Image (cartoon, grey):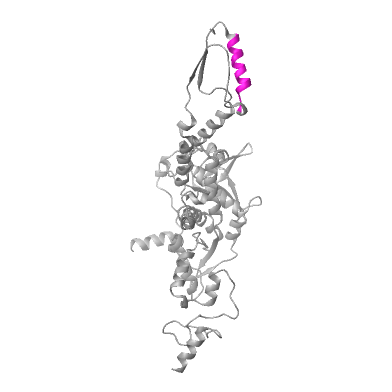
């Protein structure tokens, strides 16, 4: 018996992986990093980070999910196709399309898994759930959802904020005894590991531990942008005499009263945004030394623009998507949507699909295969160029559909016969429309 046969025999007998013990080298209680609550709060407090994460999350929430099942084209018996389950993106869609045409697969339009994704729980829509997955995944690198079951079948998904998960399952225990430690409403819960779906962005330093989000690596850049905004705000909000030293002749340490009175008058007459820039006139000899750096010299605008562009590029979001049309044109605007779909939406959709296929799909006991429609928009410019190169290769209905109109009842078939075609030739072209140039060409051909 060969190696492949021995593996098939072992897997077919229901054998389960037991591990090697190497996984126990990590700690058995992985608490959330102390930065996780701050990363979640940054979504509400830092507008640019929230905008970028929102943009990616909204694009991911627009993905349309579909369910399929493999079958034998002849006997209609269900099949297990591991290679198709492992296939990604366009490869999976092309294979499913071919199988559907040959009868090797069937689309399940009303599968319970699709219902679960469309209506995950009583307090949240499917779109909200999908977007929340993206927000948690991008900010903290982790997403937790508790599976609600009825008679062993998943009927609900309830998300849990990553900072509420205090400990991951103890890998030193048997699988049936492993639990997540979760806090909610001031109470602590132990949830069976089998009832929790955990998706994470792997941390190379600890692949079996907690996940790590993109926002974690952007901590310094995000904080710098936020501090620049607050510095500007504070400069206008409390502009007594920022960054300056005032020395008045005749004042000494024993005359604290006059110095305090002078300071109070400054705060009263020149403090606050409304008094910014007012001129002060005083008697006596006064020495003034400015210590701060003017905003123009600090280049705060350029600094913030650089930081915003940097954060946007890390999340792979084109500038046109977030309203920056400084260097844009029609071509780059259309390309921006394709870039967002290819670089941001599709990778997250694949992560989500792999998690659902691994942790949820097997619970329905029918070998359902999850897929999704490509989020990449169709290249209409390319399609129009192709149609314009040989217009006679397309029917009236195809041209009207491309223009956004409904098919016309009196304009059917091809406008003209294709080179080498004969009128009414079966399988190639329908009867030309009455009064069309195709009809004239057909009559001329029949007279020869």
Q: Position of residue 336 (x, y in %)?
A: 48, 54
354 to 304, vertically: above or below: below
In the image, residue 33 lies at what x, y percent?
49, 37
Q: Residue furthest top?
A: 254
10 relative to 167 in the view: left or right: left
Q: Quadrant of the N terminus?
A: bottom left
* Residue 356 included in the magenta stretch of the image: no
40 to the left or right of 94: right
Instruction: Give, as a single range, the part of the protein colored magenta.
Output: 257-272
Question: What residue lies at 49% left-to-right and 31% top-to-bottom?
Answer: 295
Q: Main secondary structure of the magenta part?
A: helix
Q: How many marks?
A: 0
The answer to whether residue 211 is seen in the rendering is: no
Q: Position of residue 145 (x, y in %)?
A: 57, 48
- Quarter of the image for residue 217 reads top left
The residue depicted at 62 percent of the width and 17 percent of the height is 265
In the depicted structure, whether residue 181 falls above or below residue 323: above
Depicted 255 relative to depicted 209: above or below? above
């Amino acid at each position: 018996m060969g190696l492949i046969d021995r593996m098939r025999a072992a897997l077919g007998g229901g054998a389960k992986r037991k591990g090697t013990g190497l996984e126990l080298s990590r700690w058995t209680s992985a608490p959330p990093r102390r930065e996780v609550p701050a990363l979640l709060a940054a979504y509400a407090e830092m507008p640019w980070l929230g905008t970028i994460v929102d943009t990616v999350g909204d694009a991911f929430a627009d993905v349309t999910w579909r369910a399929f099942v493999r079958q034998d084209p002849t006997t209609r018996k269900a099949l297990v196709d591991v290679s198709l389950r492992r296939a990604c993106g366009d490869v999976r869609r092309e294979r499913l399309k071919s199988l559907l045409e040959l009868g090797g697969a069937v689309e399940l339009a009303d599968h319970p898994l699709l219902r679960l994704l469309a209506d995950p729980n009583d307090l949240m829509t499917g779109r909200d759930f999908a977007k929340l997955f993206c927000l948690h995944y991008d900010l903290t690198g982790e997403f937790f959802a508790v599976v609600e079951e009825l008679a062993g079948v998943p009927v609900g998904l309830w998300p849990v904020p990553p900072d509420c998960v205090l400990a991951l399952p103890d890998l030193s225990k048997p699988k049936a005894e492993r639990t997540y430690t979760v806090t909610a409403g001031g109470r602590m819960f132990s949830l069976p590991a089998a009832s929790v779906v955990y998706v994470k962005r792997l941390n190379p330093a600890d692949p079996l531990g907690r996940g790590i989000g993109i926002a974690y690596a952007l901590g310094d850049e995000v904080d710098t942008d936020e501090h620049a905004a607050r510095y500007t705000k504070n400069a206008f909000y409390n502009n007594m005499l920022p960054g300056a030293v005032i020395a008045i002749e005749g004042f000494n340490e024993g005359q604290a009263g006059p110095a305090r009175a002078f300071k109070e008058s400054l705060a009263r007459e020149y403090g606050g945004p409304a008094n910014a820039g007012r001129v002060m006139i005083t008697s006596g000899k006064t020495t003034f030394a400015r210590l701060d750096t003017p905003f123009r010299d600090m280049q705060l605008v350029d600094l913030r623009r650089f930081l915003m562009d940097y954060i946007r590029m890390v999340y792979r979001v084109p500038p046109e998507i977030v309203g920056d049309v400084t260097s844009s044109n029609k071509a780059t605007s259309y390309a921006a949507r394709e870039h967002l779909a290819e670089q941001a939406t599709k990778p997250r959709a694949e992560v989500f699909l792999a998690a659902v296929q691994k942790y949820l799909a097997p619970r329905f006991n029918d070998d359902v295969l999850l897929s999704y429609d490509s989020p990449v928009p169709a290249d209409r410019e390319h399609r129009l160029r192709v149609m314009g190169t040989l217009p006679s290769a397309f029917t009236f209905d195809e041209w009207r559909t491309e223009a956004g109109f409904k098919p016309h009842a009196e304009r059917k078939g091809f406008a003209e016969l294709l080179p080498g075609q004969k009128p009414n030739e079966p399988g190639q072209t329908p009867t030309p429309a009455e009064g069309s140039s195709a009809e004239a060409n057909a009559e001329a051909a029949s007279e020869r």
